[in-house]
Amino acid sequence: ATLLEIKKSFRDKDNILYDWIDANSNDYCSWRGVTCDNVTFDVVALNLSHLNLGGEISPAIGDLKSLQSIDLKGNGLSGQIPDEIGDCSSLKTLDVSFNGLNGDIPFSISKLKQLENLIVKNNQLMGPIPSTLSQIPNLKILDLAQNQLSGDIPRLIYWNEVLQYLGLRNNFLVGTLSPDMCQLTGLWYFDVRSNNLTGTIPQNIGNCTSFEILDLSYNKLTGEIPFNIGFLQVATLSLQGNKLTGRIPEVLGLMQALAVLDLSDNHLTGPIPSILGNLSYTGKLYLHSNNLTGPIPPELGNMTKLSYLQLNDNQLTGQIPPELGKLEELFELNLAGNRLEGPIPENISSCVALNYFNVHGNRLNGTMPLEFQKLGSLTYLNLSSNNIKGAIPIQLGYIINLDTLDLSENKLSGPIPGSVGALEHLLKLNLSGNRLNGFLPEEFGNLRSIVDIDLCGNRLTGPIPQELGQLQNLVSLILKNNNLSGEVPLQLANCFSLAILNLSYNNLSGDIPVIKNFSRFPPDSFLGNPGLCGNWIGSLCGMYSEPTK
């Protein structure tokens, strides 16, 4: 009868619980999601996860005194967690995650002395974390992440030697981190990411020796990174998105277990310690968006497991060390927004796994390395806003998986090689603000995937190739400020996706096509071409007329 009472509170749109019908015998033990004790026939487990159930959790749940496990995750439940849940005195696991539950976490949960796993993440629970949760002696997993909980983290929680997992990310928690957090001697997972915590990282953080994952990111923590953080045995150290100041402690280079080190998006100053090169197991090193100065240490080339290296948006100087070419597993290299100079080392082409290479906004010079053609996995190449000169190498067309190629705002000269047309996966091509000359290659008609082409501010001559009409996905074509001549090709009307067209300030002549999609481009698209005429740009063809006011 209790189960039917519970069913009444659910909204079972798909009639999943069709076999939960009036029954006087022990049939209920075979109902969907119900597990009974073999001897007493008491209900010991309810597993109704991912069944698209709506409605609420009935207070009648408290009548199932033998329940050891309740799993309602991944439904559409709303309303509150009933206080009566505290009457399920045998309960070991309560999982109501990924629902739409609201209200407070009931204090009655603290009565569940057998409870080991309390998982309520991804709901809309509000109010404080009850300090009485510290009275649950066997609690191993406490996951309250992704709710709207507020107030401080109760200090008593930290005095639980059994707790292994504390997930509090994405709430509205305030206050400071207590030095007591290191009393969690059994804890391996500590995550308070994306809250409003203030104050400093506790000076005794190095005593949290059981921690394997420590995530304090996206809070408002200030002060320096404590020196003794180096005593931690963590695999993941995430401190990004705070207001931390001071230097990167050298001692981080001794944390041999580190797989992920993220100090990005803080106010850190000083150099990158060369001792970080000792981190031979680290796969991800994120130091971007700080105020770091000095050179990139060549020793980083010893981090043989490194797949992500992001040093962008700092004030780093000197040259890109050729030693980075030793990183055979490197997938992403971002050095953009620094003050790096000198040439791009040819050795980078030895990073055979490289997928993303960004050096935008530095002071790099020299020419584009021909060896880049070896980077068969590269999809993103951005060398924009530097002082790179010389020709665009024909070999660029061999990097067949490129989807973004940005060489804008450099000092590149010579013609655009037709081989660029072989980049059939290319989505974005930006060569603007260089000194490129010669004709636009008709091979551009083979760029089947292309969405954006920007070639403005060069010295290109000759006609606009009619082959561009084959580009069905082209949304934006910007050719302004060149020396292009001839007519606007009618074939551009076949670019059905074209929304932005700018041909201004060239030497184009003749009629602007009056067909299909051309009328939607404003007169600005054609300005500065004295020989162009067309009704809606105000100069009629075939006769001289005053521009219409």
Image: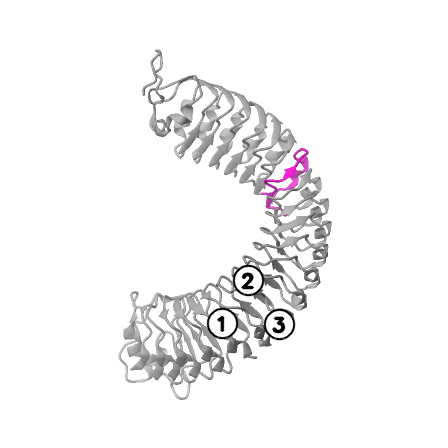
- Magenta part mainly helix, strand or loop? loop
Place residue 415 in its image quadrant.
Answer: top right
Q: Which residues are magenta?
A: 353-378
Query: Earlier along the polypeptide chain: callout 3 or callout 1?
Result: 1
Instruction: Tell which tag, 2 or 3, sits nearer the viewer.
Output: 2
**Residue that mark 1 sits on:** 153
Above or below: residue 107 compared with residue 536: below
**Residue that mark 2 sits on:** 221
Density class for disc 1 (Cα within 10 Å; few <14, some 14-19, many ≥20) is: many
Above or below: residue 258 compared with residue 137: above
Q: Residue at x 57, y 55 (%)?
A: 266
Q: Which mark is residue 208?
A: 3
Instruction: Tell which tag, 1 or 2, sits nearer the viewer.
Output: 2
Does dot 3 land on a helix, a strand or a loop? loop
In whole angstroms, how far apart are the C-alphas of marks 3 and 1?
Answer: 17 Å
Does dot 2 land on a helix, a strand or a loop? loop
Q: Is residue 206 left or right of residue 471?
A: right
Say whether marks 3 and 1 touch (CB < 8 Å): no
Query: Earlier along the polypeptide chain: callout 1 or callout 2?
Result: 1
The reply to whether residue 237 is in sight is yes
